Image (cartoon, grey):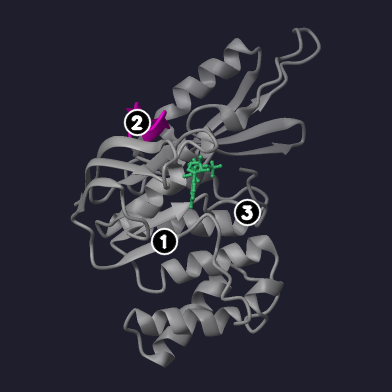
Amino acid sequence: MLRLADVSKRYGPGHWVLDRVDMQIPPAQSVAVLGTNGSGKSTLLRILAGVTRPTRGRVSGAPPVIGYVPDRFPAFDAMGSLAYLVHIGRMRGLRTAEARRRGQQLLERLQLVGGIRTPIRALSKGNAQKVALSQAIMVLPQLLILDEPWSGLDANAHDVLAEILDEVVRVGGSVVFTDHRESISGAYSTLAYRIEEGRVLAVERVAPRPRGVPMAHVVLADPGAECPPPSRIDWREVAGVAGVRSIDEAIHVQVHPAACDGLLMTALRGGWSVAEVRRDREAGRLGGGDSWAH
Ligand SMILES: Nc1ncnc2c1ncn2[C@@H]1O[C@H](COP(=O)(O)OP(=O)(O)OP(=O)(O)O)[C@@H](O)[C@H]1O
């Protein structure tokens, strides 16, 4: 298990970005790292990934294969995406044909647009992010570290990323990620830490969604002219919410099952009418192929 013991970090003579951090990343867990801009999230992830050394303290228990998606994808920019993935796959011990197959499979799964031979620098931000994600999982890592991985991804890639997190955790691996939105960190993590003034503090979390248990799907409606209009609520900011859509004047919310009661309370207090609550697997994907806003 990866452990940080009394880890502190500063850049040059600057302030302490991380201050005496004790932390462990248990197997089969997905860990969210929260904090304001500049609080040290990327610094912590770089230390966990082994690409930055702490100024003080000790990092131990790093697994042999770590996948890392940095906040800024380094531009091996003249290379096409597939050639880049083949290169990474070879460095990770795959044979060329295997690396090509895996690279193609990942880019298809994430629906890369722009061409597998187009230089990475010419891809859009979201498509470059798909390449960044693919390189991290060319070989399924025991530890997957993702710095704002949802940034710029379209709805299909969101879903694929959620599947990838599940795949890593299901085989006993660990995931560590950052994201600014509570809705994302609530839906995809089983543990969370917040960085405040250099200290890393454990955050209370809703119970992890048991494997194979589908998300809850709640349909909310305006109760109608006889009642006062319901309050405006940013559903994406409600704990455990993974997706929100508007269909025919109703709000459809996809929520972590453990957070469903909390969402219903918020809705009822806000004057909304609960039209339906169901499990997403029974419901299927609404409108076939439509996607959730995250
Ligand atoms: N290479 C570097 N050299 C000098 N200072 C740095 C370096 N990298 C980060 N810092 C400083 O360390 C602090 C933490 O930065 P970091 O990028 O880790 O924060 P963050 O929480 O990831 O921010 P954001 O949410 O904006 O991505 C900031 O004050 C930043 O300016």
Disc 1 under 8 Å from ligand 1? The reply is no
Q: Regarding mark 3 in the picture, which secondary structure is present there?
A: helix
Q: Amino acid at mark 1?
A: Tyr
Badge 1: few (under 14), some or many (20 or more) residues near its Cα, within 10 Å?
Answer: many
Find numbered disc 1 in the image and state the secondary structure of the residue it sits on: strand
Task: Mark 3 vs mark 2: give the one in front.
Answer: 2
Pick whichever of labels 3 and 1 is earlier in the sequence: 1
Which residues, given as a range, are shown in magenta? 193-207
Q: Is residue 45 above or below residue 156?
A: above
Specify whether 20 is left or right of 213. Answer: left
Q: Residues within 10 Å of mark 2 (few under 14, many from 20)?
A: some
Distance between the alpha carbons at the discs numbered 3 and 1: 22 Å
Front residue (pair 208, 44): 44
Q: How many marks?
A: 3
Mark 3: C-beta under 8 Å from nearest atom of ligand 1: no
**Is 191 placed above or below 161 here?**
above
Callout 2 secondary element: strand
Inspect the magenta stretch and tell me whether residue 217 lies in it. Answer: no
Q: Position of residue 194 (x, y in %)?
A: 40, 32
CA distance separating discs 2 and 1: 23 Å
Q: Viewer-nearest of labels 2 and 1?
A: 2
Q: Is residue 198 visible?
A: yes
Task: Report which residue position mark 1 lands on.
Answer: 68
Dot 2 corresponds to which residue?
Answer: 199
Q: Closest to the observer: 48 or 16?
A: 16
**Residue at left offset 44%, top offset 28%:** 259
Q: Position of residue 190 (x, y in %)?
A: 34, 39
Q: Which of the 4 image quarters holds residue 68?
A: bottom left
Numbered badge on residue 155? 3
